[in-house]
Amino acid sequence: MSIELNVAHCPECGNIFQKNLRNMCSNCMASEDQEIDAIERALRRNRFMTNEQAGEAAVVPVPRIRSLIRRNRLKLYEYPNLADACDLCGEATRQGKLCGACLKRIKGEIEQDREKLLVKREQVFLMKHRR
């Protein structure tokens, strides 16, 4: 009888750990929890802080705050000035990975491509059936 351990490398520090729901080693989980506590303490003093202000008050780098927001470890509904950055343009976004402007632009481009494809299909159909 053999026992199989389900292990992986921690994405934060690279140490080997037994897989868990948060997908990181216990040291990195504790460190992340401390960062979140520090950020939330700062935000309880002033819930209108921006990412930069919260990072400075909690001594946590702004990219780390954005990472925590993206992974839903920091909830935005209580803090109106916290935001993630759009993956395309870098503008602030409070929902998803793209800002409203980029999302609208991409949807427009998709719709234009869809219309072009429909026109081409119609042209091919007409050419085949005119013979």
Image (tube, rainbow, N blue to C red):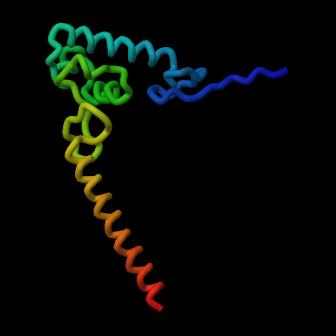
Instruction: From the viewer's perspective, tell me whether residue 49 is left or right of residue 72.
Output: left
Report the residue that reaches farthest toward the bottom.
131
- The quarter of the rendered structure image containing the N terminus is top right
Query: Residue at (39%, 75%) from the top-left corner?
Result: 122
Which quadrant holds residue 46?
Answer: top left
Number of marks present in the image shown: 0
Measured as percent of width and height from the top left, residue 8 is found at 58, 28
Which quadrant holds residue 73?
Answer: top left
Report the residue that reaches farthest toward the front.
130
Query: Residue at (26%, 25%) from the top-left corner?
Result: 61
Residue 14's place in the image compared with 115, above or below, is above
Instruction: From the viewer's perspective, tell me whether residue 106 is left or right of residue 57.
Output: right
Measured as percent of width and height from the top left, residue 84 is found at 26, 32
Closer to the camera, 16 or 24?
Answer: 24
Residue 58's place in the image compared with 120, above or below, is above
Residue 59's place in the image compared with 123, above or below, is above
Measured as percent of width and height from the top left, residue 128 is found at 47, 85
Measured as percent of width and height from the top left, residue 131 is found at 47, 91
Instruction: From the viewer's perspective, tell me whether residue 70 is left or right of residue 80.
Output: right
Report the residue that reaches farthest toward the right.
1
Query: Residue at (37%, 69%) from the top-left corner?
Result: 118
